[in-house]
Image: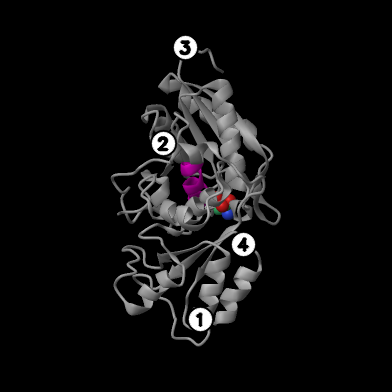
Amino acid sequence: MVDGSRPAVLVLATGGTIGMRVGEHGLAPDPGFPEALKDLVAEICGPLGADHRINHLHPPIDSANADADTARRIARTVGARVRTSGPRGVVVLHGTDTLAYTAARLAYELSDLGTPVVLTGAQHPHGAEDGDARSNLSLAVKTSLRARRDAPVSIAFGRRLLPAVRATKHQAEAIEAFRAERPLATGATGVPAQLRARRDRLSPARVISFRFVPGVAPGDLRAIAGAGPDGLVLECYGTGNAPLGTPGMREALRAVAAELPVVAITQCATGSVDFGRYAVAKEMRALGVIDGGDMTLEAALGKLAFAVEAGLSGSPLGSFMQLNVLGERST
Ligand SMILES: NC(=O)C[C@H](N)C(=O)O
């Protein structure tokens, strides 16, 4: 399928509804998908004058089952295949549930790949009549072949192209499943070269989130930190507020932030953390919490896991999280 003189696209299928069919217990991976995907990709690439290669991650997963290693595994596979076969573009097929999380993480992992990477998937299985599998795949293939070689990782879905570090799944059923409330921020510095080269940890960093809601008790925060995550993203109210008036909450937060990197983002769909605005938010900084600006949850988690795995901690980690590295936060 590759003659060397024509551009080629590498398609890496990882699972998701796009590769499923309805079985006895509901939607599940379709053993016939690899064959069907070959035909579909060939039909899309033919008129574009492009060749293709297809790889599958085994086993295909419902992306709800993605774990702390899934995005790293995808990044490693893409990196290895790009080095050996040198495609013009890469398309990653992924389930929609955690696609935005993987996309954000890949943005950091693959920032220096030199080959555009586009993620897509579908809300309906590939065999569905009037489904979105073909149109999403087609948009992703075209984008990967036409984007600048150093284009940031993106998502092609429901006729939209979105920057990975700003995208969120916002619709459970509609074809336009993803949106980016905030544009890619200008003035990005890029991933520092020394971090790209460094991988201090063999095991994946487990970075999770905790959302403040009325009713949260200090023990909830301590319990989540007690489960041993490597980093925590706090989904705060408004411009970075938290219920610090709840007895014991300050102490709990100080103890957790002394143990792990803790980054505050806003629960709001738009706007930003601003630790200078309210007295309660100002205290967050004093307790050791890092200002996450206007990063999405997905970008904050991906960036923090990337930083922890590169061996950053303490104030270098805080500075990295507050930099606009890939357009993920306005400064
Ligand atoms: N539309 C989808 O792909 C949803 C599916 N549960 C997944 O994320 O794998």
Q: Earlier in the sequence, mark 4 or mark 1?
A: 4
**Local secondary structure at mark 4:** loop
State the residue position of label 2.
139
Q: Of the residues tagged 1 and 2, which is closer to the observer? A: 1
**Local secondary structure at mark 2:** helix
The reply to whether residue 133 is in sight is: no
Query: In the visual, does 161 lie left or right of 7?
Result: left
- Residue at x 56% of width, y 70% of height: 256
Few, some or many residues within 10 Å of mark 2 (<14, 14–19, 20+):
many
User: At which x and y percent is residue 179?
Assistant: 38, 53
- Residue at x 56% of width, y 75% of height: 221
User: At which x and y percent is residue 291?
Assistant: 39, 63
**Local secondary structure at mark 3:** loop
Q: Amino acid at mark 3?
A: Ser
Q: Amino acid at mark 4?
A: Pro
Query: In the visual, does 234 lie left or right of 223?
Result: left
Q: Earlier in the sequence, mark 2 or mark 4?
A: 2
Q: Earlier in the sequence, mark 1 or mark 3?
A: 3
State the residue position of label 4.
229
Q: Of the residues tagged 2 and 4, which is closer to the observer? A: 4
Q: Which quadrant of the structure image shows residue 169?
A: bottom left
Q: Earlier in the sequence, mark 1 or mark 2?
A: 2
Q: Of the residues tagged 3 and 2, which is closer to the observer? A: 3
Give the camera-side residue of 84 and 13: 84
Magenta region, residue range: 99-109
The answer to whether marks 3 and 2 mark residues whose Cβ atoms lie closer than 8 Å is: no
Q: Is residue 24 above or below residue 310?
A: below
Residue 5, numbered label:
3
